[in-house]
Amino acid sequence: GQNIDQPTEMTATEGAIVQINCTYQTSGFNGLFWYQQHAGEAPTFLSYNVLDGLEEKGRFSSFLSRSKGYSYLLLKELQMKDSASYLCAVTDSNYQLIWGAGTKLIIKP
Amino acid sequence: DVKVTQSSRYLVKRTGEKVFLECVQDMDHENMFWYRQDPGLGLRLIYFSYDVKMKEKGDIPEGYSVSREKKERFSLILESASTNQTSMYLCASSAGTAETGELFFGEGSRLTVL
């Protein structure tokens, strides 16, 4: 079957760096998305990776290794407003979007 | 500012009632989607539409139907609500397909079926 794995919950300290991992087993691969979802709010797009490597966007970076079926989202200089759930989603060979259950990130002062 | 608006943030319905969830987007997007979001599970696609009056089943269409009479509006219908349809329902739209393009989500409709 198709599967996306992310940690259920992570805790980090304000000002620090945190890495949220996502591993996937899908029938083929056509891209990987990261979305952010604050409690009670809509998910919002963070990044899209289709080639291997690191893509940086301000304090957030996303990395992809297709050979390992692995991605991570790196958040630097953490702020309290980064407390949210982070959703990983993969497009398979049939262009179906498969979603992980999300990682709840808690930022402590 | 682009926007996807869902008509109701919170609803409480009784088993057997008909439920309408409305979604409107102001971005002139071709594609619209309905997902449900449950704790511990990834988003699951119920139905999607790539054009007016067109609809396609997603992964879990049973017990649901949809309507897209106008480009900006995509409605989800529960013909006879059941307790296992208690969930958060998210509407989304995109300029490309969901699989290759950024999705814009509404804030969700939390439905409780008693």
Image (cartoon, rainbow, N blue to C red):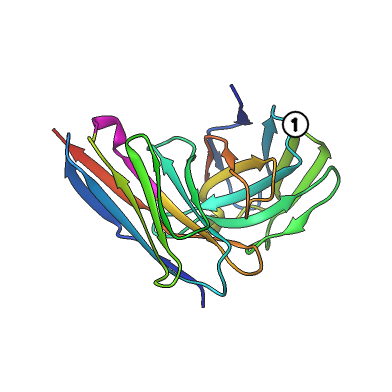
Q: Nearer the viewer, residue B38 or B13?
A: B38
Q: Horizontal and vertical percent for residue B77?
A: 71, 47
Residue A27 shown left or right of residue A11 in the figure? right
Q: Horizontal and vertical percent for residue A40?
A: 42, 36
Write the residue at 53% across / 33% down. B9
Residue B25 shown left or right of residue A86 in the figure? right
Q: Nearer the viewer, residue A103 or A40?
A: A103
Q: Horizontal and vertical percent for residue A101?
A: 41, 58
* Res. B113 visible in picture: no
Q: Nearer the viewer, residue B82 or B98?
A: B98
Rendered view: A71 above or below A60:
below
Q: Chain of mark 1?
A: B
On whether residue A75 falls in the magenta region, the answer is no
Write the residue at 42% across / 51% down. A87
Which quadrant does the N terminus of chain B fall into? top right
Read off the magenta span.
A79-86
Residue B107 shown left or right of residue A8 in the figure? right
Residue annotated with mark 1: B28
Q: Count the marks: how many?
A: 1
Write the residue at 76% across / 57% down. B56
Q: Horizontal and vertical percent for residue B42?
A: 47, 58
Residue type, mark 1 in image: Asp
Write the residue at 58% across / 62% down. A30
